[in-house]
Image: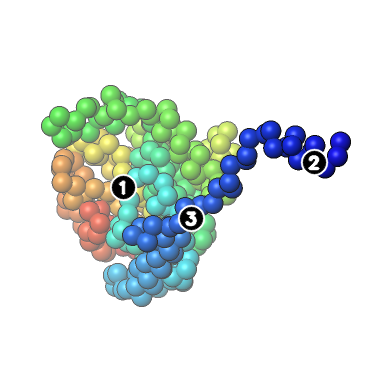
Amino acid sequence: MNGVALWRRLADFPAAPPPAFPAAADPAQPDPAMVEELAYRDRLARATEASATCWFDVPGGRPVLAPIERAGITRLVESISGSTAGDKIDAMIETMAHAPDGDVVEIGAWRGRSAALLVLLARHWNIGKVLCVDPWLAAACDQGSEPAGRPAAPERMDADWAHRIFQINLAPIAGGALNFIRAPSSVAAQAYVPGLVVETEAFGRTAYEGAIAYLHVDGNHAYEQALIDARAWTPHVKPGGWIVFDDYARPSGDGPRRVGDEFLVAEAHRISLSFVIGAALFVRLKTA
């Protein structure tokens, strides 16, 4: 086939469309890469300020987190759905830095946001192992104080999937320092003794001291249930340890506030410090 014939043959094919090039960026829209960078800048600035802040007057404590470390921990924690944020995260960081060695126990873990913070800090400072207690049952999510017109908790929550999400979120960062008991807190408390070993498929085998350095109470907020949690677990907190009553200043439902106030009165002889930050009540026990 000569060149002329080849050209005629090729000419019979439809012309290929011109190559597609990305549309020019809309100057009115912010550059996504710059938006992301600004968010990181803001996070580091907030972490730098928090690291330089004196949150409370307690002598001693572990080395302060460097701003880069603090920003990295908060970024990872806030990637998990949940309500723990802002000042409460900062206060938990600072109180964990002043906790004794021992177990870190969380009552009410759900999808694992605050559990992620606890295990990252416990591992960073080598405080102890983290134990998360949650029944992961929809019925247990009914706080008895839903806003008007909102479906009851059991009708809008898939507890089995919350449990799976918890495991997905925590598996990459647990590092052998976290496990869970899927049971009501009163049942789990009966098993909480020195030498406790918890074994699960997701997190393997974890041994616990049986004495609590840091207790985060964030279970069912109905008064009766919050009282059960406090009575079952606060006696296990060692001298110098911390108890955090989450949602103490919650706008709806007064269970955590009532239980927290009762604890402050009944256990005044054991308490060295208490304050409210980020809607949570933080209580430090005396060292002796």
Label 2, on which residue?
A: 4
Residue lying at the far right of the rendered structure:
1
| Residues under numbered marks 3 and 1 in contact, where contact means CB atoms less than 8 Å apart | no
Mark positioned earlier in the residue sequence (3 or 1): 1
Mark positioned earlier in the residue sequence (3 or 2): 2
**Which class describes the residues within 10 Å of circle 3: few (<14), some (14-19), or many (20+)?**
many
Q: Residue at x 27, y 36 (%)?
A: 220
Disc nearest the viewer among 3 and 1: 1
Residue 176 is at least partly visible in this image: no
Residue 116 is at least partly visible in this image: yes
Kind of residue at disc 1:
Ser
Kind of residue at disc 2:
Val
| Residues under numbered marks 3 and 2 in contact, where contact means CB atoms less than 8 Å apart | no
Q: CA distance from mark 3 to mark 1?
A: 17 Å
Q: Residue at x 59, y 39 (%)?
A: 204
Query: Looking at this view, is 74 or 125 the one in front?
Result: 74
Q: Secondary structure at mark 2?
A: helix
Kind of residue at disc 3:
Leu
**Which class describes the residues within 10 Å of circle 1: few (<14), some (14-19), or many (20+)?**
few
Residue 196 horizontal/vertical position (percent): 51, 40
Label 3, on which residue?
A: 120
Disc nearest the viewer among 1 and 2: 2
Label 1, on which residue?
A: 83
Mark positioned earlier in the residue sequence (1 or 2): 2
Numbered circle sitting on residue 105: none
Q: Secondary structure at mark 1?
A: loop
Q: Secondary structure at mark 3?
A: helix
Query: Looking at this view, is 23 or 201 the one in front?
Result: 23
Query: Looking at this view, is 40 or 111 the one in front?
Result: 40
